[in-house]
Every structure is written in structure tokens, then in C-alpha cells.
Image: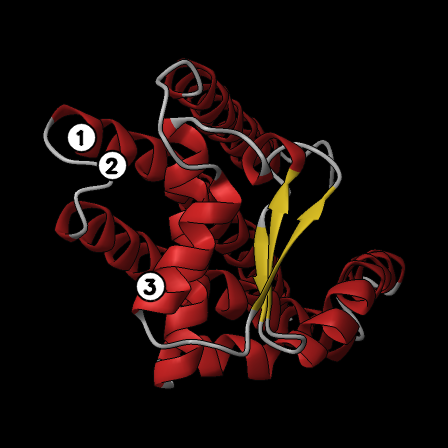
Amino acid sequence: MVYDPLYLVIMLACMALSWLASSQLQRAFQRYSQVPMSLTGREIALRMLADAGIRDVEVTGVPGQLTDHYNPATKRVNLSEVVYGTRSLAAAAVAAHECGHAVQHAKGYSALKMRSALVPVVQISSNLAQYVIMAGILLMGLAQGGFPWVLLLGIILFAFSTLFSLVTLPVEFDASRRALLWLEQTGVARGEQHDMAKDALKWAAMTYVVAAIASLGHLFYYVMIFLRARNNN
């Protein structure tokens, strides 16, 4: 499989896109971390939650950089060390974005509900998919195209991860939309600062777009292998 030219093209393209999105995100975060704000990331999060009438969500700090996330199960906005106690535009944008997810949860945003429902399924399927796919390809090679159902099972398992990646996109874009709207309406970030926050969140969203493209590319490749084997038989 690793010597298939199509597979190498898909892998190299995904690696290049991932590197571009990640490097641009890091560059944007570093640049906008130099823009001072009057509130820390924690204070931004608490204020946005209060404005949305959300009283049952906790704001906590977590280790690492760009490890920020909202956990619907625990109702907790987790902010990384460089966001939680930092007064910068980058911290404000990230904190507001994560609170955007909390607002989605409170309002019953359908895409977030779907993503949350997929989490336990994807946790199982993603661990099994690669092993089942590799076993399916190996069996078809040894049996001259036999046992295609094993590969098909692997494709179905992998498809859940692809679906999760696709459902994640509207969730992330909507959270950024809510964050930017709140930043502007409250006057926390307007004009040039609002444009900077929008740029930072754009590159954060691009990492999810690249992940979805990569997942679709791999799914397409596995389906092509299956169809090729079935046609040969």
C-alpha cells in the first residue's frame, strides 16, 4: 500500500496542507499574542458566558499550548496556559471561540449534538479501522482478491471518522461566528482588533478543514482499492 503512487500523492498533499495550516496558525497566534487587551482569557470566557446567561459552565486552565477545548460532558471550558491568564488578542479570540461551543451546547445546536453522539462510536471505530483495513488489503493480496468484505468492514469503520471530521466543520465555524459577533457587540474587539481575531480563528478553523480533507482522501483511496478488487473478480 505504501508504494502505491496514488496513496503517496494523497499522503504528501495532506502533509503539505497540514503543515501550511499549522504554521499559519502558529504564526497568527504569536503575532496576535503581542496585541494587548484589558482582560485575560479567563475573564473573557466568564464575561461571555455571563452575557449568554450560562451559569453552570466552569472555566479552568489546562497544560500545553493550543490545547483549548470545551467539554460538553463536564460543561467545562478548558483554556491552555497561554490563554487562561494572558491579556492578549489571541487569548481573547480563543477564549471566546471555546465559549462559543458552550453557547452552542446551551442552545441545543444540532451539529454539536451530532458530533457529541458520534464521539463514543468514533473512539471505537478509529482504533479498529486501520487494523481491519490493513488486514483486508493483506488478505486480498494473499488470496488474489478474496475476502473483500474485510476491507469493506474497515472502510465502514473509517467512514465514521470521516463523518465526524465533516460534522466538526460547521461546529467550529459557528463557534467562531458566535465569538466574533460577541467580541464586536460588546466592544471587546472592534475594527482592526476584530479583523485580527477573525484572522486568528480562520487559521484555527483551517486545521479542521485540512483534517476533513485528509480523511476524505484516505476514504476515497480505500474505496478505490475495494472497487478495483471487486471489478477484477
Residue at (72, 46) in percent of width and height = 62
Amino acid type at image mark 1: Asp
Quadrant of image for the N terminus: top right
Nearest to N terminus: mark 1 or mark 3: 3
Residue 195, disc: 1
**Tag 1 and tag 2, C-beta contact below 8 Å:** yes
Residue 201: percent from the left, percent from the top? 34, 39
Q: Nearer the viewer, mark 3 or mark 2?
A: 2
Q: How is the image coloured?
A: secondary structure
Q: In this image, 176 relative to 218: left or right?
A: left
Nearest to N terminus: mark 3 or mark 2: 3
Residue at (53, 58) in percent of width and height = 224
Q: CA distance from mark 3 to mark 2?
A: 16 Å
216 in relation to 198, above or below: below
Residue at (36, 30) in percent of width and height = 38
Q: Is residue 29 visible?
A: yes
Q: In this image, 208 relative to 183: left or right?
A: right
3 in relation to 230, above or below: above
Residue 28: percent from the left, percent from the top? 39, 21
203 in relation to 47, above or below: above
Q: Is residue 148 visible?
A: no
Of residues 116 and 125, the one drawn nearer to the viewer in this rendering: 116
Question: Which residue is the site of mark 2?
Answer: 198
Residue 139: percent from the left, percent from the top? 86, 64
Dividing the picture into quarters, in which one does residue 112 lie? bottom left
* Residue at the extreme left: 191
73 in relation to 30, above or below: below
